[in-house]
Amino acid sequence: MENILECQNLVKFYPKCLALNSVNLTVPKGKIVGLLGPNGSGKSTLIKLANDLIQPTSGKILIAGMEPGIETKKIVSYLPERTYLNDWMTVNDMIGFFGDFYQDFNKSKAYDMLARLGVNPSLRLKTMSKGTKEKVQLILVMSREAQLYLLDEPIGGVDPAARDYILDTIIGNYNPEATVIISTHLIADVEKILDEVIFINQGNIVLVSTVDDIRENENKSVDALFREVFKC
Amino acid sequence: MLRKLLRYEIKATSRTFLPMYALLIVFALINKFFMAVNSSYLKIPQAIAMSVFVFIIIGICVMTLVVTIQRFNKNLLTDEGYLSFTLPVRVHSHIDSKMIVTLMWSVLSVLVSLISIFVMSVNETTILSFQRFMNELMAAFSQIGPSGYVLILEAVLLVIFGILSSTVEIYAAITVGNMSSKHKLLTGIGAYLGFGVIQQIIVSIILSSSDKSITRYFNLLETAGEFAQVQAAETVLLVLIAYMVIVGVALYFFTEWMLRKKLNLE
C-alpha cells in the first residue's frame, strides 16, 4: 500500500450545502502536503472525514487502505482547529492521557518540546493563554509516532517565532515514512516545508502538484499561485 | 480501553463529588456536636447547621444530575469531542464509561447521605430503635420465606436498571439536541419530553389491549392469600425491571448509532 490517504468519488452534503463534490485524491507516504484553499472550501470537511468525525454522503475515504475507524485512529494524529484539551487537567495529565490511549505516543519527545517552548508542564490548561494551549496541543499531536498527521490550521494562533519552531519540529521530528497534511491559508509561512500542494475550492480539487513543479513550470511561489488561482 | 476511560471519567468527576461528600460529613459531625451539647444558647447556629446539612444533601442530588448531563455534553459534543472521538476507542465504550460512573456516583451519593445521617443521629436510643426495626424486618422476612429475598433482589435490580435507563434517556436527548444547529438545548428538552410521551403511548396501548385482564387480576389479589400477593409483587417488579431494560437498551443503541453516524461537531 503506497498511498496513505485515498478518496474515491468522495461526496459530503451538509444541510443546504455541498462541502465536497466527488473528490478523487491520492496522497502518498512520506510527504509533507499542503491542503490549501480559501475559507469554506472543504479543507476541514475532508480532514474530519478522514478522522471518522463525520460520515461521507457517498464515496469512500481510505487511510492506509482502511475505512476510518479504530484501526485508522491508531495511526492518524489529528490536530483540529479547536482546542480540545480538558481544561481542568495539567499538561502532565494530558501527556499521561495521550500515553494511555495512543501506543505510539513518545513522552520524552513531548517533554523536550515543552521545555524548548518554555511551557511549564505542571500548569493547568485553564490558566493558559489561547496561543499556549495551541502549542501544547500541537506538541501532543506531534509527539505521536503516527503514519499520518492531519494538521488543521496548526499555526494560526501562535506567534511567528513559535511558528518557525513548530514548522521545524514538523519537518525535523517525524519519521520519513509518515505523511503530514497541513491545512492552512498562511501559505507563505508553510511553503518552505511543503513537498506537495493540493488546491481545493468549493469542494473541488483544483490542483495537485509538487512544489518544485510549480516553481519550475509557473516560475512563481505557491503563495503567488494561490493568490492567482483564488483571486476574488 | 474501557478501564482507561473509566479511570479518566472517575478522575474528571471525583473533583466535584468528593469535596461535597467531605462537606456533608463535616456538617454531620457539626450537627452531632450541637445535638450532644443541646444548649439553648446554641439553638440558632444549630438550626442553621441543620439546614445547611439538608441543603448539601439536596445539592448532591442535583449535582449528580448536572454532572451526568455536563460530562456527556462537554466531553463528547463540544470541542473536547474532537479528542474523545479520535481516540482509538469504540463509541459504545464512551457511553458505557459515562453510564457506569453515573451509576457509581448515584449509589455512592445515597450511601454517603445515609451514613452521614447515621453518624449524626447515632446514640443509644436511635440504636435501640434501629435494632428493633431490623428485628421486625427479619421477622417479616422469615414469615414470607425466601421470596422476601427475591423481592429485595428485584428492588435492587430495579434501582440499578432504573438509574441506567434514565441516564441513557438523558444521553439520547442530549444527542438528539446536538443535531440541531441552532436550538440545541430546546431540541434536547423536546427530545426528552418526546421520549416520555412515546413511552406513555406504548404503555397505554399495551394496557388497553390487555382488555382489563390486568385490572381484574389486581382486583382478585385483594382477597387472595399472602402468598399470592407476594408473588404478584414479584411479578410486578419483574415487569418493571423488564420495562426499564427494554427502554434503556433501545435508547442505548439509538444513542450509539446517532453518535457514530450522525455526529457533527461544530
Image: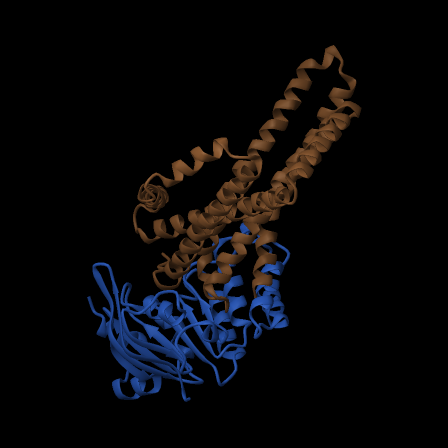
Chain colours: A blue, B brown
Q: Is residue A188 visible?
A: yes
In front: A203, or B126? B126
Residue B39 located left or right of residue A166 = right
Looking at the rendered image, the quarter that the N terminus of chain A falls into is: bottom left
On screen, residue B143 above or below A25: above
User: Residue A11: which quarter of the image?
Assistant: bottom left
Residue B228 is situated, as x and y percent measured from the top left of the image, at: 53, 39
Residue B258 is situated, as x and y percent measured from the top left of the image, at: 37, 59
Residue A63 located left or right of residue B35 = left
Looking at the rendered image, the quarter that the C terminus of chain A falls into is: bottom left
Residue A149 is situated, as x and y percent measured from the top left of the image, at: 45, 74
On screen, residue B168 above or below A34: above
Residue A21 located left or right of residue A182 = left
In front: A214, or A145? A145
Residue B179 located left or right of residue A122 = left
Q: Residue furthest top?
A: B40
Residue A193 is situated, as x and y percent measured from the top left of the image, at: 43, 78
Residue depicted at 39% across the width and 76% down the height? A67
Q: Is residue B79 visible?
A: no
Residue depicted at 60% across the width and 31% down the height? B56
In front: A231, or B45? B45
Q: How many marks?
A: 0
In front: A125, or B189? B189
On screen, residue B185 above or below A32: above
On screen, residue A61 above or below B145: below
